[in-house]
Amino acid sequence: MGKLPKLDSALYEAELSRLQAELVEMQEWVKSTGARIVVLFEGRDAAGKGGAIKRVTEFLNPRQARIVALPVPTERQRTQWYFQRYIEHLPAAGEIVLFDRSWYNRAGVERVMGYCTPEEYVRFLRQCPQFEQMLIEDGILLRKYWFSVSDAEQEKRFRSRMRDPMRRWKLSPTDLQSLTRWEEYSRAKDEMFVHTDLPGNRWNVVEAEDKKRARINMIAHLLASIPYEHIERPELKFPKRPPSTGYVRTERRLQNEVPDVTTGLTKGNRYRDPEDAD
């Protein structure tokens, strides 16, 4: 299949809104039934994982849909069982947890950059399928997404981030090394798939050259994979306000009020992520 044209922005926005409404329906089902969902977002640096997560969670209740993006492990955590620090973030009944990178760090960046020993890496490949099978057997709905992007597109996005002060924080020295270690990361990904892309627990590969298409495709796939149903919500009725009991609001001059800076505003250019450009 040849390269598809960029997805039309108006079509993208309309379909995204429809899918986000369905995500709200799905969350209501999760809350009502006590289901537990774990979604892993993995892939190349700058492949669009963060943008997809943002669109998934935009209208969800953050008390029931959490994003987990763990920092570098502490010295104490390095002495724990590898999966231990991830376990505490797993969902309880009625919750959705989205991992912005997950335990698969060990099979990717840690493996390529030498942050783990060969013995730790081999142990991970052996234990990971067993660990995930335990989650599945306990009733957790586990979904794994790999965002795939070409080396040329990755470099283009890296260069864009270097020029954009709004997104410069997304770029680290380790990220940039992925440019020179492209084939090493490719081999690590292939080996990881051999051990962890298993029947009943497959990796779902998202073609992410076009971020808009990737978001639509990923969200649509997630919704289709969850057996959610429409849940009737109780009708809400506004209560009548009771008569006043004589309360008088505190005088504004007695409060430390935030200054109004809006009166001097002028129209400016709205920030637009260059990577989302048509």
Image (cartoon, rainbow, N blue to C red):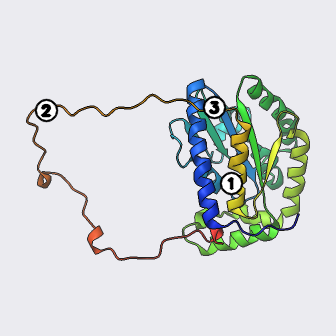
Q: From the viewer's perspective, is 184 left or right of 261?
A: right
* Picture coordinates of residue 7, whole percent (x, y): 70, 65
What residue is disc 2 on? Answer: 243
Q: Name the N-terminal-most of marks 3 and 1.
A: 1
* Picture coordinates of residue 79, whole percent (x, y): 71, 35
Q: Quadrant of residue 73?
A: top right
Q: Image height check: is 207 above or below 25?
A: below
Q: Amino acid at mark 2?
A: Pro
Identify the disc placed on residue 229: 3
Q: Image height check: is 192 above or below 161?
A: above
- Cα separation between marks 2 and 1: 50 Å
Q: Amino acid at mark 1?
A: Ile
Give the secondary structure at mark 3: loop
> Do labels 3 and 1 touch, CB within 8 Å?
no
Give the secondary structure at mark 1: helix
Residue occupying the far left of the picture: 246
What residue is disc 1 on? Answer: 216
- Cα separation between marks 3 and 1: 20 Å
Q: Quadrant of the N terminus?
A: bottom right
User: Which of labels 3 and 1 is toward the front?
Assistant: 3
Name the foreground residue: 29 vs 163: 29
Please name the residue shown 28% across and 31% down the image: 239
Q: Note whether residue 203 is visible.
A: yes
Q: Residues within 10 Å of mark 3 (few under 14, many from 20)?
A: few
Q: Name the N-terminal-most of marks 2 and 1.
A: 1
